[in-house]
Amino acid sequence: MESSGTTRRQATRQRLYEAAVTLIAEKGFSATTVDEIAERAGVAKGTVYYNFKSKTELFEELLRHGVGLLTASLRAAAEESEEGGGTQVEALDAMIRAGLAFIDRYPAFTQLYVAELWRTNRAWQSTLLVVRQEAVAVVEDVLREAVRSGELSEEIDIPLTAAALVGMVLVAALDWQAFQPERSIDEVHSALSLLLHGRVSGH
């Protein structure tokens, strides 16, 4: 069992993550100060440095934390689908929905993550690549199993297909939030599900 000190520290870190992600999404990394993060989180500036050595480390941990939550929700969706007797393609479908639900819940983090993927000169680039690979690997595992069980063609390129599925969900969800917020998660999921099942071509 965790001590109350550990739990309290986790709660503080969670507040700092939430404050940082909101501010950085609004103003950008460079323009956001540690003072502002502390103020938004309702903690003393010293608390930030007690938990993280620097603003860069806070941001690295924020990326790890956020993508870790996404990876866990994708894995849980796939496992739940499989436990219910679903096919591997149904597991992929469940992961698409889980990804949309995650983005719906953490829109600021998702915007930040997608923006950072395209920047190449950042101190945390290697961290970002590692955590991105963890999320994509969950999808790769299910695709590999789908090929093994004969549900999907052996011709598919697993790493690229996994990356494409993750990218599709991220970009479609951001588009949904920014430009089509009146749509329900069910509508967005249905559209992506059709793409997954290859029914867009009308066959």
Image (cartoon, helix red, strand yellow):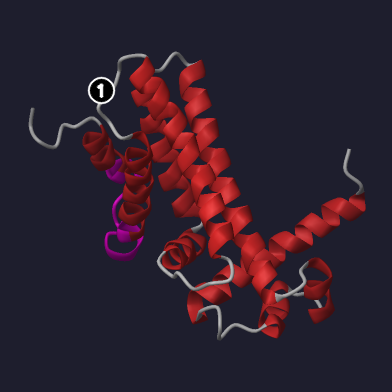
Q: Quadrant of the N terminus?
A: top right
The residue labelled by disc 1 is 153
* Residue found 59% across the figure and 58% down from its top: 127
Q: Main secondary structure of the magenta part?
A: helix
Q: Position of residue 28 (x, y in %)?
A: 51, 79
Q: Position of residue 116 (x, y in %)?
A: 47, 67
Q: Local crowd at mark 1 within 10 Å, few (<14), some, or many (≥20)? A: few
Q: Is residue 183 magenta?
A: yes
150 displayed left or right of 29: left
92 above or below 65? Answer: above
Is residue 181 among the parts visible in the rendering? no
* Residue found 33% across the figure and 42% down from its top: 160
Could you tell me which secondary element the residue under label 1 belongs to? loop
Q: Position of residue 79 (x, y in %)?
A: 52, 25
* Residue found 33% across the figure and 65% down from its top: 178
165 displayed left or right of 128: left
The residue range painted magenta reads 175-188
Q: Residue furthest left?
A: 202
Q: Is residue 95 magenta?
A: no
Q: Amino acid at mark 1?
A: Ser
Towards the viewer: 33 or 126: 126
82 above or below 70? Answer: above
31 displayed left or right of 198: right
Towards the viewer: 70 or 148: 148
Q: Position of residue 103 (x, y in %)?
A: 45, 53
